[in-house]
Image (cartoon, rainbow, N blue to C red):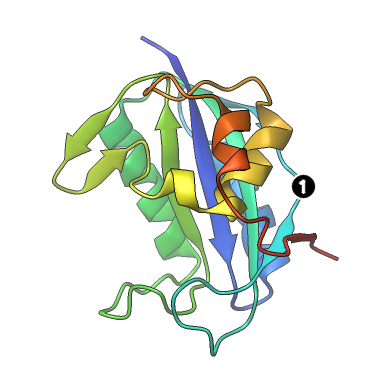
């Protein structure tokens, strides 16, 4: 069975635009998957640790026949290819971060994957790019994207230049 899924792209190291462009190039190559739409690139202030460069953020909508677990495995391979090193510092700088935000209208709670993303409703750098690619989105809990946007600060998101 194939589904729509939304992937967040984040980077603040080693030329973030090049990292995001690479991610999109490789998302296009995933088996049984095609890109439906990609948001513009946004600049956001770091979340958590403040003493690091700004982040580039984007959201890509995919149509995939991969399962959530197989998709996650592929996303981790793309991150690894770009030099992503996972360490204790959860909120630190990174070359590339690919998160599954939503998978169809389903919820999952695996040991290594929670969908919807555990903090999707509180992060403007997820919600505003989502608005660009899927303005009429309804979350698995029945709330609309517009409702969720009304509950978060814009956080001075700017287009990446």
Q: Quadrant of residue 16?
A: bottom right
- In this view, 110 is above or below 19: above
Nearest the eye: 63 or 99: 99
Where does the image place residue 112, in percent across and percent down from the top left? 20, 49
Q: Is residue 36 left or right of residue 90?
A: right
Where does the image place residue 56, in percent across and percent down from the top left? 66, 64
Judging by the rendered image, the residue that carries numbered circle 1 is 40
Nearest the eye: 158 or 154: 154
- In this view, 99 is above or below 96: above
Q: Residue at x 58, y 67 (%)?
A: 11
The residue most toward the bottom is 51
Circle 1 Cα neighbour tier, 10 Å, few/some/many (<14 / 14–19 / ≥20):
some
- In this view, 32 is above or below 39: above
The residue most toward the front is 151
- In this view, 89 is above or below 43: below
Q: In this view, does 26 lie to the left or right of 119?
A: right
Q: Can residue 81 be seen in this view?
A: yes
Q: Which residue is drawn at 45% across and 45% down?
A: 120
Q: In this view, does 88 lie to the left or right of 45?
A: left
Q: Residue at x 56, y 74 (%)?
A: 46
Nearest the eye: 145 or 73: 145
Q: Which residue is drawn at 33% across and 73% down?
A: 90
Q: Quadrant of the C terminus?
A: bottom right
Q: In which quarter of the image is residue 44?
A: bottom right
Q: Is residue 33 visible?
A: no
Q: The residue tagged with tag 1: helix, strand or loop?
A: loop
Q: Quadrant of the N terminus?
A: top left
The residue most toward the left is 111
């Amino acid at each position: 069975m194939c589904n729509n899924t939304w992937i967040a792209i984040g980077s603040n190291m080693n030329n973030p635009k090049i990292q995001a462009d690479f991610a999109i190039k490789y998302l296009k190559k995933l088996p049984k998957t095609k890109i439906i739409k990609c948001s513009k690139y946004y600049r956001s202030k770091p979340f958590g640790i403040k003493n690091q460069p700004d982040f580039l953020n984007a959201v890509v909508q995919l149509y995939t026949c991969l399962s959530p677990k197989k998709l996650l495995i592929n996303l981790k391979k793309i991150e690894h290819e770009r030099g992503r090193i996972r360490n204790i510092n959860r909120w630190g700088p990174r070359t590339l971060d690919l998160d599954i935000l939503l998978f169809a209208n389903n919820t999952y709670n695996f040991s290594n994957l929670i969908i919807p993303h555990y903090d999707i409703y509180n992060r403007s750098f997820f919600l505003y790019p989502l608005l660009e690619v899927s303005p009429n989105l309804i979350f698995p809990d029945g709330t609309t994207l517009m409702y969720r946007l009304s509950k978060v600060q814009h956080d001075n998101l700017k287009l990446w230049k």
